[in-house]
Amino acid sequence: MELIHMFLNLVAPPITFFSLCFFLPPFLCFKFFISLLNSIFTTKDLTGKVVIITGASSGIGEHLAYEYASRGACLALCARREKSLEDVAETAREIGSPDVITVRGDVSKVDDCRRLVEETVDHFGRLDHLVNNAGLSAVCMFEDSDNITNFKHLMDTNFWGSVYTTRFAVPHLRNSKGNIVALSSVDAWLPMPRHSFYNASKAAMLSFFETLRVELGQDINVTIVTPGFIESEVTQGKFLTRKGKVEVDQDMRDVQVSAAPIGSVISCAKAIVNSACRGERYLTKPSWFRVTYWLKVFCPEVIEWSYRLFYLTRPGDPSTETLSKRLMNILLPPITFIALLFVWPLYLVFKFLSFIKRHLFSENVAGKVVIVTGAASGIGEQMAYEYAKRAAILVLVDIREDRLGAVVDCARRFGSPNAIAVAADVSVEEDCKRFVDTAVNKFGKVDHLVNNAGIARQCSFKNVDSISKHTPIMDINFWGAVYGTHYAIPHLRKSKGKIIVISSACGWYPLPALSVYNASKAALISFFETLRMEMGGDIGITIVTPGLIKSEMSLSASSPKAIPMESKEECAKAIVKSACRGDKYPVEPSWVRILFPWNAFCPELTEYCNRLALMSRRHVIANRNLIQSTYHKTE
């Protein structure tokens, strides 16, 4: 099996490169032709259609209500601010909506989401469009957070609010062959500093609805919108602060928005409704923001350097909004393309030289203090052994104390001068504080933090019987890493240490029947990309995205048998080497990296292949128990 991976690692990248060179031009022409036909011939009549819009009391949600109203749609508007919601409803009636109801509700509460859908269907008898627009933003350097739990409401609103509402709406949308419109953000792939929690929530949302689109097939269309800077309360300075309070901070708004042009909310709402009616998969407004995705794919370090240069400044810098939005939309894409042609070769040379340097000056971890979560088995266990072979001091964390003791004994035999076990649940903030404090009190420092703990639950979203069974996935996979990192950062800064994050290839290549798991891993990637910029050079961050690794999770009945799996021993060895070198984005096995450009440039093709290969498998079980009742496994 290792020979197969060696062969794929050598052959797959050049084959992918040449395949894209030949395949991409005709594919893009085909997409342009189809898009042109859709814009001319495929426009749905919305007269009498029933539309739910969350977060409809202001901003994009408010103007989406007006746009749908102008096309004769019936509206069910939801928000927490009842007075503002009634004003929007009255304006929508004046514009042309034949019937409008308002439902005061908080989408972060599952009962409110159920009530929203039920009241809509009871009143109108059907549902045609669901617009998941409700969201909060937060602006705060991660290190400055007073209380991490203050930001859970942001994830509950931005991500879980969309999941809850979608869950109750799917049966009715299936009956009407309806549409789901999900408002994510360009911050899902652009890790803007001070927005770590917001970026993570939008990345989770993007990944979830990409997965859901594959699962639903042609029954329900899913349009994912990724707005850039659009006129709204957020771009006017309304943020969730580090104390957990929503405040207007004009100075911070100037820092975050800077001189970037702000798109019109009216034109944005119109474009969103047009895209939903045409059945488009993705929409980015303003459209020039789309080029940032190309830069992220080819030159992620350039994005990081640019953000660090332009955004990590003191609040109060004035914003000069003088650039023409139309000029940016027309000129920026070709400028970016031409710049990539000239810059990319030099950039690749620079990356190669950096790669050589990292290989020559790898870190010696002998005597270093390493915390590994989810260490009782799987990748976490093997990473403990790999660090032990390099004479590192280990603090091993897992919820299963009985199995953890055996791992500690093996680690000592492999060469660790000292290893201790800490029984802890990473989804509990107090437990995370305790294992960091234990490491510091026992050994006086922390050098490496390995955020490995994770669980998965395999189930097609349409067959989910209870959303509450899936919330531990986000609590463990995402919040567990956030809590541990929060308490470890002061010590890692002192030691110039490293954070190793075990995400997944599913974070950027979402597989069906793993919607919440994919979302949690996408949130991890986005959060730690943002944190890397905020930390600068003080703390190294290695984000690992494993593919199929031999473990209890990947060896479950539904794992594709045709895809070769890498051993967890080889995976752990490669991860520790990457961490010692200071690599930013290791992928194991490395040939899995070829899926990223295919998904970036040909998402329709990868979606079709996933649906064909995975959704038709008879052994994809509707309701599968947690693959592990504890969090010790990742891939």
Image: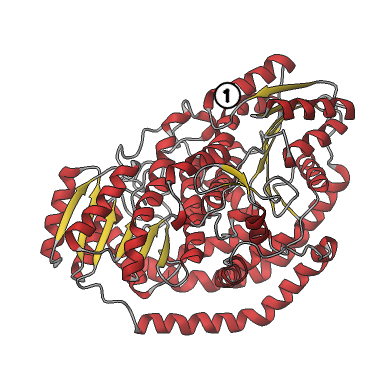
> Where, by quadrant of the figure, is residue 44 drawn?
top right
Q: Which corner quadrant holds the N terminus?
A: bottom left
Q: Position of residue 41 (x, y in %)?
A: 87, 43
Q: Residue at x 13, y 51 (%)?
A: 406
Observer-nearest of 633 and 67: 67
Residue 429 seen in the current view? yes
Q: Is residue 500 left or right of residue 278?
A: left
Residue lying furthest top in this view?
A: 122
Residue 395 seen in the current view? no
Q: Position of residue 378 (x, y in %)?
A: 28, 52
Task: Specify the color scheme.
Answer: secondary structure
Residue that label 1 marks: 112
Q: Residue at x 62, y 56 (%)?
A: 252
Q: Position of residue 119 (x, y in %)?
A: 66, 17
> Where, by quadrant of the figure, is residue 448 drawn?
bottom left
**Few, some or many residues within 10 Å of mark 1 (<14, 14–19, 20+):** some
Q: Is residue 76 left or right of residue 605?
A: right
Q: Amino acid at mark 1?
A: Asp
State whether residue 322 is above or below residue 353: above
Observer-nearest of 361 and 634: 361
- How many numbered marks appear? 1
Observer-nearest of 502 and 438: 438
Q: Residue at x 49, y 45 (%)?
A: 243
> Where, by quadrant of the figure, is residue 539 drawn?
bottom left
Q: Is residue 486 left or right of residue 255?
A: left
SS class of the residue under badge 1? helix
